[in-house]
Image (spheres, rainbow, N blue to C red):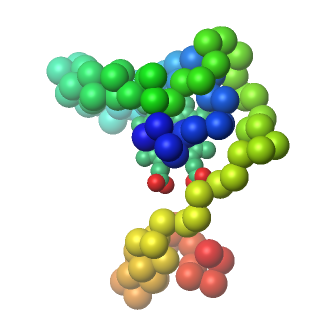
Amino acid sequence: MRETHDGMSVTAGELHALVEDLVATLDEFDVPNAEQEQLLGLLGPMRDAIVEVESLETGQPLPATYQAAPALRGVPAAVAAAQTLGISGFGTVSEL
Ligand code: HEM
């Protein structure tokens, strides 16, 4: 988790925004509080590995020095499988 987010200058505010969106989504799907707390309890301890800037700012651009990680190897296979099964919404292999 630390390696993935290293050098992104993720702020505390951005992590709060993620948690807000997550809770709103869980509420939308009527996920009970106990399960929500279980999930947030797992994410909470990851804070130190993700947040690099103690500020409530959000929407900060990625630093110019940041280099995106290579695409996950499993993704093209999943997209191809969805295409074969006729499941829409995953894009097509040629778009990857
Ligand atoms: C608890 C909160 C978070 C969790 C559990 C989490 C988890 C992850 C995971 C699993 C990945 C994929 C790693 C991989 O491809 O190997 C990822 C990538 C990424 N995360 Fe997070 N993340 C969190 C918060 C954030 C926040 C707050 C931001 C920025 C506002 C952020 C920005 C990104 C970006 C840009 C990537 C793509 C990295 C790349 O492919 O180069 N994450 N995150």
Where in the figure is residue 9, as x and y percent of width and height? Answer: 66, 29
Residue sitting farthest toward the right: 64
Q: Residue drawn 50% across and 43% down?
A: 3
Viewer can see residue 24 = no
The quadrant in which residue 71 appears is: bottom right
The percent position of residue 25, horizontal first and vertical second, equals 42, 33
Q: Is residue 95 above or below residue 16?
A: below
- The residue at the point 71 percent across, 16 percent down is 57
**Quadrant into which the C terminus falls:** bottom right
Nearest the eye: 21 or 42? 42
Q: Is residue 62 visible?
A: yes
Pick the front one: 25 or 58: 58
In the rendered view, tell whether residue 95 sits above or below residue 8: below
Q: For the point 21% across and 25% down, which residue is it?
A: 38
Image quarter of residue 85: bottom left
Q: Nearer the viewer, residue 76 or 35?
A: 76
